[in-house]
Amino acid sequence: MLYLGTEITISSLVTEPTHSIIHQSYNSKEGEEPLNGDGFGLAWYAPHLPEEPALFKAVTPAWNNMNLLSLARVTKSSCILAHVRAATPGLPVIQLNCHPFVRGSISFMHNGKVGGFAKIRRRIIERLSDAAFESIEGSTDSEYVFALFLDQYSAQDQGLAKSERLARALGATIKEVNSIVDEAGIEDASFLNLAVADGTSAVVCRYVSCGSKRANTLYIHTGSSFSCVDGLYTMAEPDKGTHAVVVASEPLGSNSEWTVVPESSMVVIESGTGVVMRPIQAPPA
């Protein structure tokens, strides 16, 4: 789940809604696995403080962490990322493998898996710069994808708008993952719902590499402001502009105004300027 907009408490997004990400961690309605109890994580950006976001992770289930409930209630942010984890079989349940991952001002998280990761891990390493390789602390496929992204982000024109730079880097990362998987002759599909943010802009995508497979679900809701009272979240109508955007694997409640993000699409969000949804494609030459 990702939020970008006017400042809100973390609890109004993460813990209070009737189908919050905490509820989704033990009763996911649309995921292949309804239980996501292998840890959780939060990243949030603090206004007027250093660009690097705060990060809170734990391997305990999100629904059973009292520190999370207390922290979320009194912390405000205009850019929040939240993730609950169902560990890929064979990968350990350790704090370093919990999302989001943060390097500098960039935060990143992943819902899905890289096809045949155990067989291509070394190939990924061979494509990384020294700096990107040294950024890897855990063992999950998601963090290796993030390392690929960091190299692609560094390669983009720094004169681009922040959101466009993130979007081009994300598209190039998906292309590179597919190239590595194909090069190794892996037939397993890669499920790449990825989210990346820098505090004032964000990009989220919905993607699966195999046309016969269905990508993991992804929804978006936009409006002028977001709030939650007595478990019911409200997104005010965008008549005064789009100043609040929530992207989530599942809607936070029964509100019918959530929009399904199409497969092979990315949502590009720039603070104060709105949202653009577009097909995933390789960046311009």
Image (cartoon, rainbow, N blue to C red):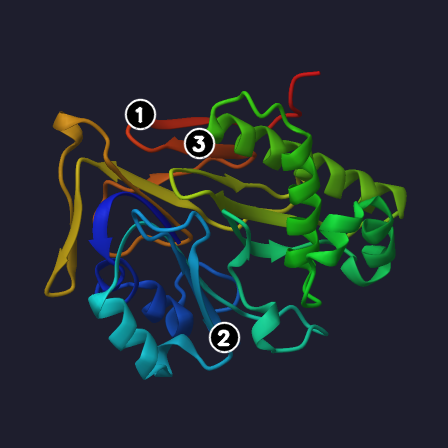
Nearest to the observer: residue 216 or residue 229: 229
Residue placed farthest to the left in the image?
A: 230
**Residue type at numbered disc 3:** Val
Nearest to the observer: residue 210 or residue 266: 266
Does 202 sit above or below residue 102? above
Q: Which residue is mark 3?
A: 268
In x, y percent, where is residue 223? Answer: 21, 36
Q: Which numbered disc, 3 or 2, marks the residue that appears first in the sequence? A: 2
Observer able to see residue 209: no
Does 218 sit above or below residue 140? above
Which residue lies at the image location 31% right of the left edge and 25% below the top edge? 273
Does 110 sit above or below residue 207? below
Q: Are marks 1 and 3 in contact (CB under 8 Å)?
A: no
Badge 1 crowding class, 10 Å Cα cut-off, few under 14, some 14 to 19, many 20 or more, is few
Q: Which residue is mark 1?
A: 273
In x, y percent, where is residue 70? Answer: 25, 76
Closer mark to the observer between disc 1 and disc 3: 1
Position of residue 158 in the picture relative to residue 132 (left or right) = left
Badge 2 crowding class, 10 Å Cα cut-off, few under 14, some 14 to 19, many 20 or more, is many
Distance between the Cα atoms at labels 3 and 2?
28 Å
Position of residue 62 in the picture relative to residue 16 (left or right) = right
Element type at mark 2: loop
Which residue lies at the image location 68% right of the left edge and 66% below the top edge? 137
**Residue type at numbered disc 1:** Thr
Please give the label number shown on residue 39: 2
